[in-house]
Amino acid sequence: MAQELTIVTVLYRSSEMLAETLPTWVRSAGGLPVRFIFADNWPQDGSAKVIAGFLDDDRYDYLPDSANPGFAAGCNRAVAAATTSHVLLLNPDVWLPDDALARICGAVAEDPGTPVAVGLAMHGGEYVGIDLNPVSLFIDRSAAVSRAPLGPSGGAAVFPTELFRRFGGFYEHLFAWGEDADLAFRLYASGLRTRGLDLVLPHAGGHSVEGDNKLQGFRAFLLARNRLLVAARAFTWPLLLVVLPILALAHVALAARRVRQGLLRPFLRGVGRGLLEGPAARRQWKGKRFGFASLLSYLTVRRA
């Protein structure tokens, strides 16, 4: 497998956004050994034409799937097709400064075996990877936090390709929102740490659901369900028994927020589905789980 980088991007109603961001990717790639794979979960919007307008045919693969299997499945399908040593998972609504890919390739060369969390600037803040949160379980990690990331965010994440595949990639049943946290907990529990890269990429955030009430409801459903599924899959029984009452109280607070947003019904449906599906989700991961020792390590070890 060549020591090169493949940018993996999952598309969903992304043609207009990609027309803005892809030219910055092409400029940043320059003469670097970078390829592209696009898993398009909404191929009818013309993203294929946008891609063909900026990239030569031999530099990218385009994988359409009108059934929309979700972000997690799209990433897995694209990484399965990668032939390079590393993959950069990159959302289509992220712009790349001209030197970004050179810096990412440099970070890979320095430590090829370690995942890298690349920073994202969005909603007025700067974030690098994933952090723990007592209310929502997982959250975008502020760049100001002193400890290293729990794991990379799926919006801008570098993984050794073999490592991503060995851990089964993203749990596809989650569909979207939380699949990166699930993988982060599993990687951390297995002793694999993530480096944060001192690089912050402009990120629009939420382009695929913006302005669509139905999709906003689907997102509320998935977030409520997936928090419970991630905890069920990734945590040891002792930690899970402590976390569940905390999550129950947190969901009461979150429910009040969803009422104000008009999203209570999908939120409650997600909680119910999470409780029903938790046992099956747990059985589907046989590896090491995140427990009290992992938690203590994460909270006390500061980044280098």
Image (cartoon, rainbow, N blue to C red):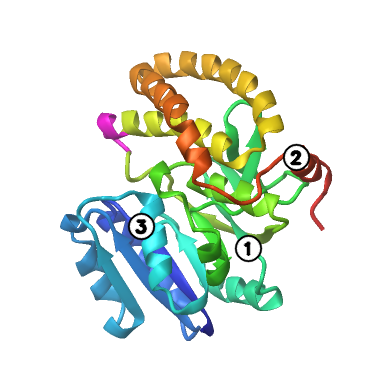
How crowded is the residue under tag 1: few (<14 C-alpha within 10 Å), some, or many (20+)? many
Q: For the point 52% across and 49% down, which residue is it?
A: 180
Q: Which residues are drawn in magenta?
A: 210-215
In the image, 146 versus 164, the foreground residue is 164
Q: Is residue 110 left or right of residue 87?
A: right
Identity of the residue drawn at 79% across and 54% down: 303
Which of the labelled discs sits on residue 295, or is there none? 2
Taking the image as drawn, is residue 152 in sight?
yes
From the image, which quarter does the C terminus lie in? bottom right
Q: Earlier in the sequence, mark 3 or mark 1?
A: 3
C-beta proximity under 8 Å, tags 2 and 3: no
Vertical side of 290 occupied by 199: above or below: below
Number of other residues with Cα within 10 Å of mark 3, as a class: few under 14, some 14 to 19, many 20 or more: many
Identified by mark 2, the residue type is: Leu
Q: Residue at x 65, y 30 (%)?
A: 240
Determine whether, in the image, residue 171 is placed left or right of residue 207: right
Disc 1 marks which amino acid? Pro
| C-alpha span from label 2 to label 3 | 30 Å
Q: Between tags 1 and 2, which lies in front?
A: 2
Mark 1, residue position: 115
Alpha carbon of mark 3 to alpha carbon of mark 1: how far?
19 Å
Residue 4 screen position, x and y as percent: 52, 81
Residue under pointer 3: 74
Say whether marks 1 and 2 touch (CB < 8 Å). no
Q: Amino acid at mark 3?
A: Gly
Front residue of 101/162: it is: 162
Q: Is residue 183 left or right of residue 35?
A: right
Q: Is residue 66 magenta?
A: no
Q: Quadrant of residue 207?
A: top left
N-terminal of the two: label 2 or label 3? 3
